[in-house]
Amino acid sequence: MTVVAALATGLAVLLWRPPDTWWVRHRLGLGGSVAARPAATTGLVLLVATGGPVVVGLPGPRLVLALTVAGAAGFALRQARSSRARSAVRRRRAEVTDLLGLMAAELRAGILPAHVLAGLAPDFGFLGAATRSADIGGDVPAALRVAARTPGRELLGELAGAWHVAERAGAPLARVLDRLEESSRAEREIEREVESGVAPARATGRLMAVLPAVGLALGSGMGGDPLAVLTGTWPGVLCLAAGVALACTGVGWVERIADSVERAP
């Protein structure tokens, strides 16, 4: 067991090491949480290293129960992470839309584009690289395209194209930004309608997943002890594992359908 724990800890240390380009991107202000995923993988490996020997030493039904609980917890953590990611994407899209409106207003007031970026950069951190590029006469559209790679900020790619055309051909940038803001707000309104449409399906799926717990409470209230059967006997723990697997599959299926609807053009 000690050898397994040592090997897993060593693997976690190797996985923690960030990519070689992380330091360069960090110094240039190009952003991106490059080390977040290795850190999550490290935590998982360390958890397996410390808890694996304990789980393996459990008796048969307890081992299945522990694996079932771990699987359900991992599934719930993954769903929570996906929900947070969707919220973050929506928040970033709202930020970019607000940015376009503010930029268009300041440009119409006669402020130079480089000064507009410098004034808005403290409130919109993702403009840091573009602002530094503007200060040194660098390629602002390229910096905006890099920022557009973050999910939820794809519209910065359109801003980069408009900026490039304005620099080369002298086209009015404020008018283009007005159009981009209008289209972005219209798309956000459609997204809100779609989200409100799929929200009942998501809520129903989650409710059906936790509904069996109500049955356990009813059984306990009637004088039975269903928990002892489900956690202490082979038939009970196998039924519990199958039920949890089916519940997670159902929730995952509903979430996948809802995600596909939200991503549909």
Image: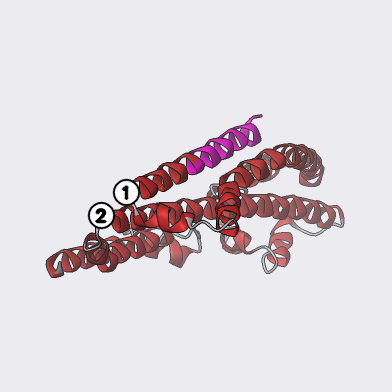
Residue drawn at 80 percent across, 47 percent down:
174
Residue 125, horizontal then vertical, whole percent: 62, 64
**Regarding mark 1 in the picture, which secondary structure is present there?**
helix
Residue 260 belongs to the span the image colors magenta: yes
Camera-side residue: 16 or 222? Answer: 222
Residue 124 belongs to the span the image colors magenta: no
Overall secondary structure of the magenta stretch? helix
Q: Which residues are magenta?
A: 247-265
- Answer whether labels 1 and 2 touch (C-beta < 8 Å): yes
Name the residue type under label 1: Trp
Camera-side residue: 120 or 165? Answer: 120
Q: Which mark is residue 234?
A: 1
Name the residue type under label 2: Gly
How many numbered marks have been drawn onto this rendered protein structure?
Answer: 2
Camera-side residue: 82 or 111? Answer: 82
Q: Which mark is residue 31?
A: none
In the displayed structure image, the side of residue 152 where residue 63 appears, left or right: left
> How many residues crowd around disc 1 within 10 Å: few (fewer than 14), some, or many (20 or more)?
some
Camera-side residue: 54 or 31? Answer: 54
Q: Nearer the viewer, mark 1 or mark 2?
A: 1
In the displayed structure image, the side of residue 144 where residue 238 appears, left or right: left
The residues bearing labels 1 and 2 have C-alpha atoms spaced at a distance of: 8 Å
Residue drawn at 42 percent across, 47 percent down:
240
In the displayed structure image, the side of residue 204 where residue 248 appears, left or right: left
Q: Which mark is residue 60?
A: 2
From the image, which quarter does the N terminus lie in? bottom left
Which residue is most to the front? 223
Residue drawn at 25 percent across, 65 percent down:
49
Residue 146, horizontal then vertical, whole percent: 53, 50
Residue 99, horizontal then vertical, whole percent: 74, 55
